[in-house]
Amino acid sequence: MCQLRHVTGRNERHIPVVVLAGFLGAGKTTLLNHVLRNAGGRRIGVLVNDFGSVDIDSLLVSGASGGTVSLPGGCMCCTTDAEGLGDAIAALSAAEVGLDAILIEASGIAEPPALIRLVLAARSATASYGGLVYVIDSSQFLSTIAGHPMVGGHVAVADLVVLNKADLVDGDEMARVRDVVREVNSTASLISVSDALIDPGLLFDDAPDRPMDDGPRQLSLDELLHDDHHDHSHLHAEFESVSLDRVGPVDPRRLARFLERPPAGAYRIKGTVLVDLPGHADQAYVIQAVGGVVRVSRQPWGDLGPATSLVVIGSGLDVASAEAALAGVLGRDADDEHGILHLTRHLA
């Protein structure tokens, strides 16, 4: 069981749990190290079943105790097994721990579809499914999927497919790789990168504002690894976002359908919406959705007053279709008295 330190003075928040998977040699450990090195102030928990099997860069490790390895910047790595996954997620997502996201390295724990089911079963008031990121070696993918057909089933359940090692293939081969991926998964976001250099902003929100601490402290990852001459332009953002900001309500039935069946290429949908119904207009509905898995919560409107604000984030997103789909949730069918149930069934 993870032995966790406690961080005080932090409001309880909903923590995304992102599953990271990929065939041997695809680059998922490189991606994991890259995300930790470029956390941008985020505090990330990493769950693996055998710490020794995941080569987290030794530069990142600052101390170990029992099943927990502390990482600079408030991040940590815990060992677990499939049976203990729910308990580990609950422990890491507790408000007093102070993490912003949790990454699960899939190798050795379970096949990706089974691991997704475990994460969904472990959802709580503080944690929810944040998507499956599947990393492939673009230079070996066609031969890999031919020799290991089960890889197609893994790709099929991914919400984001990282086409890694893009520098090792020409344009024609990359086009074939994309076609094969699309044959088994027509809706996931696809992103082509080299050295697994994805922008962590595709996976997680920005770090929340935290009080300044001018006293003695451990350096953050950003400070520890900072190089004034380092060029951060290599971070392959390569993703699009489409937003909707209106002073007006949404139709809850149409919104639920949009969230459950997001546009192709959409990875995350988030925001707040107004539902203009008796007993509902004084509360904001806060939306989080990944790959058709929807989480809804309610909270009072802030100082800005009732409004609808939604953003769709993805790679390979059909922007025009996403904009049209977003616009389609506006308004309200006055005769649809039960439409709100389609949204409230996702209440956390």
Image (spheres, grey):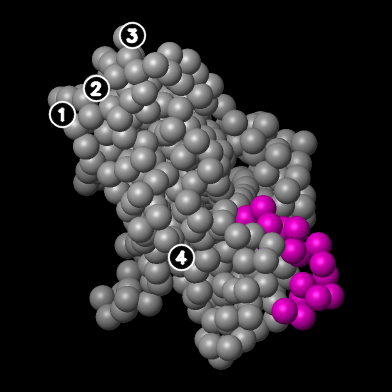
Are the two marked residues, 2 and 4, in contact with CB atoms closer than 8 angstroms? no
Q: Position of residue 96 (x, y in %)?
A: 44, 29
Determine whether, in the image, residue 22 is placed left or right of residue 303. right
Q: Residue at x 67, y 72 (%)?
A: 180
* SS state under label 1: loop
Q: What residue sits right under mark 3 in the picture?
A: 279
Quote the CA–CA distance across marks 4 and 1.
33 Å
Q: What residue sits right under mark 1 in the picture?
A: 304
Q: Which stretch appears magenta? A: 142-158
Q: Residue at x 50, y 74 (%)?
A: 192
Q: How many residues crowd around disc 3 within 10 Å: few (fewer than 14), some, or many (20 or more)? A: few
Q: Return the disc, 4 or 3, that comes first in the chain's sequence.
A: 3
Quote the CA–CA distance across marks 3 and 1.
20 Å
Q: Position of residue 61 (x, y in %)?
A: 53, 59
Q: Return the disc, 2 or 3, that comes first in the chain's sequence.
A: 3
> Which amino acid type is shown beneath numbered disc 4?
Gly
Q: What residue sits right under mark 2 in the picture?
A: 301
* SS state under label 4: loop
* SS state under label 3: loop
